[in-house]
Image (cartoon, grey):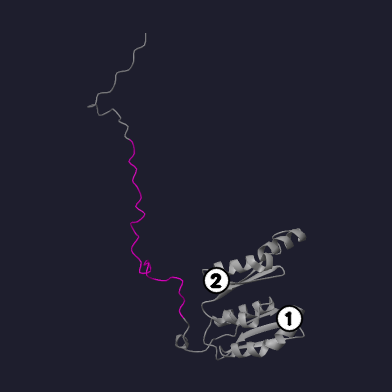
Amino acid sequence: MSSSPPSPSPNDPTSETKTSPTVTKKNHNKYRKPKPWDNDTIDHWKQEAWKPEYMNGSLLEESSFATLFPKYRETYLRQTWPLITRSLDSHKISCTLDLLEGSMSVSTTRGTVDPYIILKARDLIKLLARSIPAEQALKVLNDDLQCDVIKIGGLVRNKERFVKRRQRLVGPDGATLKALELLTNCYILVQGNTVAVMGGDKGL
């Protein structure tokens, strides 16, 4: 007849007591300190205008961009190119219209003081190639406007289905497109397989 082993006494030093491990919570806010920009009164979307005194000298290297344009834009670009040239000259950016190769190019000069304006000029010729009117495209040179060219051609393989969905984006008599422009405060143009958008950071 088997008997159960005696239970260890609490004073017995040889007895082992099992204790549950203590779990310490991590204090994630231990190193978090108030930041100067964590203030509701600060407009984080505000962009300060560039001032010439920010640049002490001229740019060290020349930057240039080029883009191709379709054949049907040749006549319009030839007519509006003097306006584009005058606008870019005010920012010390040189531009070239090559009708033989069907391309537009922009580049910095020795007098360029704004290092970001060349990217704005790149966006300008990109918008002009996507059938944006010159008066509207020149607005992208402002600091508070950005642009994007969204490719929608590869979203649907079936061409007929793509045309129907693109028409749904425009809407009857452009009503859907106009509603999107009012909601986002952006300029939207659907052309071919792309959608060109111009507006502020919030709208984009």
Magenta extent: 20-48
Residue extending farthest to the left is 11
Which residue occupies 72% across, 84% down? Answer: 76
**N-terminal-most mark, 1 or 2:** 1
Please say whether residue 26 is visible from this viewpoint.
yes
Where in the figure is residue 2, as x and y percent of width and height? 36, 11
Where in the figure is residue 157, as x and y percent of width and height? 74, 58
State left or right for residue 44 relative to residue 134.
Answer: left
Disc 2 residue crowd, few under 14, some 14–19, many 20+, Cα 10 Å: some
Disc marking residue 185? 2
Task: State the residue in front, 68 or 133.
Answer: 133
Which residue occupies 69% across, 83% down? Answer: 104
Above/below status of 11 relative to 173: above
Q: Which residue is mark 1?
A: 73
What is the quadrant of the N terminus in the image? Answer: top left
Measured Cα–Cα span from mark 1 to mark 2: 27 Å
Amino acid type indicated by mark 1:
Arg
State left or right for residue 31 relative to residue 60.
Answer: left
Disc 1 residue crowd, few under 14, some 14–19, many 20+, Cα 10 Å: some
